Amino acid sequence: MALPNLWGLYNLRSSPFFQATLRADSEATPLRLFVGRQRERQLLLTTIGSSASSRQAVAGRPGIGKTTLVQTVKADAQAEGYWSSDEIIPISAEGASEQLLGQLLSGVYDAVLANCPTAAGPEVEAAQQLVRSIRLRGGGLTVSAFGVGLGGSQSEIVATPPGALLLDGPRVLRDLLRYAIARGARGIVLHLNNLENLSEADASRAADLLRGIRDQALLHDGLHLIVVGTTDAVRTVVQSHTQIRSVFSNPLVLEPLDLTEVKQLLANRYEALQQDPAKPWRPPVTDAVVQKLYELFRGDLRGLLKALEDGITALLGLTSAGAEVAPVGLGDLLLSLRQRNQAELQEQLGDTAWERLVAWAQVDPASIQTQAELVGLWAVKQPSVSQTLQQLIEAGAVEALPRRGREAIQYLMTGTARLAL
């Protein structure tokens, strides 16, 4: 017996509100669903195409499509003869510069194997040995979809001492890049991510790690790096040290997609997920719903999609199989989300933090607040405000806006909290 598919009520195979990153190698979330960002896309590609090596940074608020933009740019570059893989290399504040060097070497190695599965020769063997050693030591690297040890010699790999990466890694990385270029690659494009949730201290530490491998790894001909994260984290990582700032382009700060582009994004997904080609798909929500959520989430696609998924799934669960259903309206969806979000946030926050969030909403849920202003609003001391804000941020109820110089950090309720209140 086939399991029920609630989205089939709208002639859709599955939920169109998925949050998975679009990938070139995915049928479920293909890059052809990408919408907008043509100017930013061209800027990134022009920098790559105009340089023997390049280092760029893409910044912006969480959830506005930074990672998907870079995945699309990698696919564009791939079509023009550059090599890359769908792997995303995380930057961590933990470990040492050696670990970050290993991550870059691993990323280049994966890109070589993705584009030349039969790669062999001393350059590949040397890279294979170091990459395998790092991964077996649990160096925090992502494991390629191609596995470890493909290509090169099939001889037994000798354990590599940890210090060998610092001694041999830069040379092995350089030789592997030259190998790729000799076999037709115009360069290798790597995507460094994971700056989304770094604290200020962690971002400073990541900046130190990047500085530690500047000359050994970042400046090799043929290597093109794109770092992705929140505006504050990216600026801290790539602009804290003169040595790094001088070799990185100014961060490309993304603004949210406009409402028209968001509607087009959803329409593209509906069309791609059409279940019966002989019948038209139907939108699960009205335009009024999309517009209201867009305003509440201030263009945060991740938050908007999750709200649509949560609200509509709950409402469709009450629908009889085979029933004719109209697009969900604004009133029904807001009621469903208010009940759900309120219950979840109250449970996560506890009484004190919840009451303080309510007090903020009673002033104006769309208001921007500083810690000094919240000291007065909540009638508590600054350490208590700081602790509550951290709790609210971790619960997804509040976000810190990008810092402006030495001005006090400003805070704003997220769409999730505003829906609950």
Image (cartoon, rainbow, N blue to C red):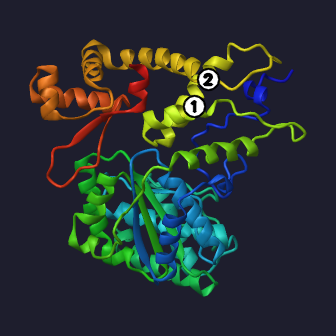
Identify the amino acid type marked 1.
Ala
Structural crowding at the residue carrying mark 2, measured as other residues with C-alpha within 10 Å and reported as few (<14), some (14–19) or many (≥20) = some
Q: What numbered label is drawn on residue 329?
A: 2
* Residue at (75, 44) in percent of width and height: 271
**371 left or right of 206 in image:** left
Count of marks, rendered view: 2
Foreground: 69 or 38? Answer: 38
* Residue at (53, 32) in percent of width and height: 306
Q: How many angstroms separate mark 1 from mark 2 (CA)?
A: 8 Å
Q: Circle 1 sits on which residue?
A: 288
**277 left or right of 70 in image:** right
> On the rendered image, what quadrant is the C terminus found in?
top left
Q: Is residue 216 above or below residue 375?
A: below
Which element is circle 1 on? helix
Q: What numbered label is drawn on residue 312?
A: none
Instruction: Point out residue 239 in the picture as x, y percentages from the top left corner.
Output: 26, 65
Instruction: Point out residue 132 in the picture as x, y percentages from the top left corner.
Output: 52, 62
Foreground: 121 or 270? Answer: 270
Residue 129 shows in the view: no
* Residue at (56, 25) in percent of width and height: 310
Q: Is residue 343 above or below residue 309?
A: above
Quadrant of the rendered image containing residue 77 = bottom right
Quadrant of the rendered image containing residue 313 = top right
Structural crowding at the residue carrying mark 1, measured as other residues with C-alpha within 10 Å and reported as few (<14), some (14–19) or many (≥20) = few
Identify the amino acid type marked 2.
Gly
Instruction: Point out residue 53 in the picture as x, y percentages from the top left corner.
Output: 44, 80
Foreground: 242 or 100? Answer: 242
Instruction: Point out residue 247 in the picture as x, y percentages from the top left corner.
Output: 32, 76
Query: Contact (CB < 8 A) between labels 1 and 2?
Result: yes
* Residue at (42, 76) in percent of width and height: 54
Q: In the displayed image of the protein, which residue is found farthest to the right?
A: 278
